Amino acid sequence: MNYKPYSMEWWRKRYLAEAIQQYFDTDAQVDVILQDIMDVLGQSAEEHKTRAEKFQEVIDRLKK
């Protein structure tokens, strides 16, 4: 996808492209690339899960 230059989406895609390029520039193994992606996504999912649990705790206490 082509985004309007300097838009939030454009910067996001640029940073992603640069990060991916670094893996290839350093000749990283495919397994390393995949594991790093899994680690980042897993960490993000865990952080969101923890945050959701805190929200739910506040909601539960408000209902009491």
Image (spheres, helix red, strand yellow):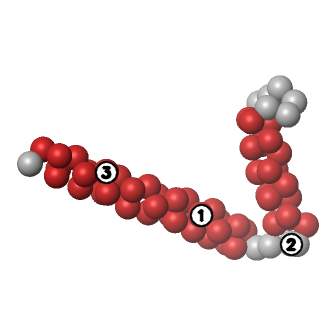
Q: What kind of residue is marked 1?
A: Val
Disc 3 and disc 1 in contact, CB within 8 angstroms:
no
Q: Mark 3 or 1 closer to N-term?
A: 1
Tag 2 residue? 27
Residue sitting at 23 percent across and 55 percent down? 57
**Of marks 2 and 1, the one in the foreground:** 1
Name the spot of residue 49 as percent of width and height, x first.
38, 57
Q: Is residue 25 left or right of residue 31?
A: right
Tag 1 residue? 40
Residue sitting at 80 percent across and 73 percent down? 28
Q: Nearer the viewer, residue 53 or 24?
A: 53
Q: Please tell me whether residue 41 is drawn above or below residue 36 in the rendered image.
A: above
Disc 2 and disc 3 in contact, CB within 8 angstroms:
no
Q: Please tell me whether residue 45 is drawn above or below residue 4 in the rendered image.
A: below
Secondary structure of the residue carrying numbered label 3: helix
Q: CA distance from mark 2 to mark 1?
A: 20 Å
Q: What kind of residue is marked 2?
A: Asp
Name the spot of residue 17 as percent of width and height, x first.
82, 50
Task: Answer few, some or many: residues within 10 Å of disc 3's Cα (few below 14, many 20 plus, some between 14 and 19).
Answer: few
**Of marks 3 and 1, the one in the foreground:** 3
Q: Nearer the viewer, residue 15 or 53?
A: 53
- Name the quadrant containing residue 4: top right
Q: Which residue is the extreme one toward the top?
A: 4
Secondary structure of the residue carrying numbered label 2: loop
Residue sitting at 76 percent across and 51 percent down? 16
